[in-house]
Amino acid sequence: MSEHLNDQEIARREKLKGLIEAGIDPYPAPMWEVNATAKEILDAVEKHKAAHPGEEVHEVEGYKDISIAGRIMSINAKGKVTFIKILDNTTRIQLFISIDNICPGEDKSLYNNVIKGLLDLGDFIGVKGEAFVTKTGETSIRVKEFKVLGKALRPMPVVKEKDGEVFDAFTDPELRWRQRYVDLVVNPDVKETFLKRTQMVKTIRDFLNEHGGVEVDTPVLQGIPGGAAARPFITHHNALDTQLYLRIANELYLKRLIVGGFDFVYEFSRNFRNEGMSRKHNPEFTILEFYVAYKDYIWMMDFTERMLEKVATAMHGTTELTVGENKINFKAPFKRITIYDAIKEYTGHDVSTMTEEQIYDVCKSLRLEVDKTMGKGKLIDELFSAKCEKNFIQPTFITDYPVEMSPLTKKHRSKPGLVERFELMVNGQEIGNAYSELNDPLDQRARFEEQVRLMERGDDEAMFIDYDFLRALEYGMPPTAGIGIGIDRLCMLMTNQPTIQEVLFFPQMRPENLTS
RNA sequence: GUUUCCGUAGCUCAGCUGGUAGAGCAAUACACUUUUAAUGUAUGGGUCUCGGGUUCGAAUCCCGACGGGAACACCA
């Protein structure tokens, strides 16, 4: 192993020894009491400067006795004074370390030996001192005491910046995603994006809780992977000696809870789908699903647009966002259009009264890749995704889907052959999928059986029959509105990120062959 | 899964029609008591992803593998 070390790694191990020889524990056990953050100090000094214009700042009330900790991001040793920038949980702040402050007595070795000789970029240190502003106007901490809290043995990318221009940016996607810990340290925007994701989820959770939602957990390991059309991951339970699947959706379990008497349940569901990966797809991803008894899909549109309006406002202070090239406004109400009208608008074909064969011919005439295994629902879905989807930039509810493509959805109250379903499109992408839930157990059984016929016809994504779910419905389920919202996709919009990998801490990648 | 591009120092990148590897930062040493991508001087650092092939000679050309990006397909 040691022969693989590069010069920098060797140098750092030497310094590690040096610290130990100097009687300094490079990985001390006791906690380091922190009483301020970098951001807080910078803000306090700004405020002080604003209140005392023209005055030279020597100390700031409340920040004369600071104790902070962080990672060393730059060292600028200038003889008997050294400037170090550390990064704490909030931001970077400069430390001013002079030989006289740190070594008031005769022994100058702490400065000459340790500060100048044994510290590296990446090391964690704790310091105590006072806030002040340097000659050149940078808020700093005059260090009176410092302690090594954690030695770094591996060099980090050094990203520099001047006047907003970034030098030697750490940009390689492979390195950034595999070593997200490094990405987070050197690219502050990355951490910011993930903090926004957390804020987004919290806003949604608060909204649902305020409206009576109950957060629940349902099984990830399922005997029958139901609730969506997708290929599952398969696993095996040893003690039961049985095949289990990682869930592709939690829908059927949340509906069982509605049967059980909960009127409003929700879950942020990590789902797993054994399909291709892309900038919009990760094998595991998060969907928020919620189900509300005695409501219908019309109510759900109203509720959803209010929720998203609130999320946008909480995150940006306005409903208007810039996403890529587009300006998107989450101001409720959102536009609503039926899927047939959408297809008519963008293809000129009115498929609402056509037979399966006629729709097949329309698809062919538009040069879509379709085949005879596809049922009517699937064909319409193809038509919509190929010709219409990309046109819906502003939030739009697409409503009233054909029954063939919606096996878990209640039949439309007035339009034969359709169901009470909507998908929410934003920025040309599907963000949510909702229905008036099918609660007629006999109809549900018939729909499942139709899925079996599709499967026999060659559709490898048709749904399995879940007999326990049918049993639950037979006990009676109230009319219910339900929705699934892609949290990663929503986060991409809300944080203006072009790929799903940028909103997942650890996107799936081929395993790395690391042996040492 | 298909198409296409990429893989050179810790990081970001040069390296032409083949002649045995370079810069900046980082590292090492010295100088400097308010620096701002600090500066100055000096030094070290590479199985050019891996394996074959062509050639007197391959980072460079060809084939294959591995890893990654982008587009398409499937889905959310």
Image (tube, grey):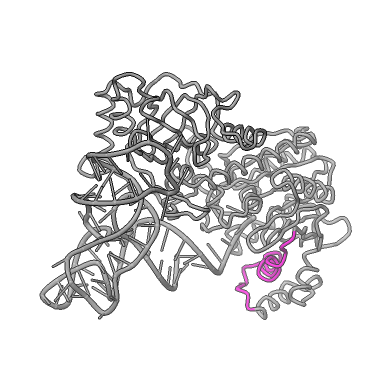
Residue A77 occupies quadrant: top left
Q: Residue at coordinates 45% horizontally, 33% vertically from top-left?
A: A95
Q: Is residue A166 above or below residue A200?
A: below
Residue A170: in magenta span: no
Residue A392, given in percent of the width and then of the height, sits at 72, 64
Q: Is residue A180 above or below residue A57?
A: below
Is residue A133 among what the camera can see? yes
Q: Is residue A359 above or below residue A236?
A: below
Q: Residue at coordinates 62% horizontally, 37% vertically from top-left?
A: A54
Residue A372: in magenta span: yes
Q: Residue at coordinates 65% horizontally, 33% vertically from top-left?
A: A52
Residue A458 occupies quadrant: bottom right
Q: Classify the position of the C terminus of chain A by image quarter.
A: top left
Residue A100, given in percent of the width and then of the height, sits at 37, 25
Q: Is residue A28 toward the left or the right of residue A296 in the image?
A: left
Q: Is residue A401 toward the left or the right of residue B41 in the image?
A: right
Q: Is residue A395 toward the left or the right of residue B17 in the image?
A: right
Q: Which of A28 and A497 is in front in this view?
A: A28
Q: How many labels does the image show?
A: 0
State which region is magenta. Answer: A367-394
Q: Which of A176 and A337 is in front in this view?
A: A176
Q: Residue at coordinates 75% horizontally, 38% vertically from top-left?
A: A208
Q: Nearer the viewer, residue A421 or A161?
A: A161
Residue A150 occupies quadrant: top left
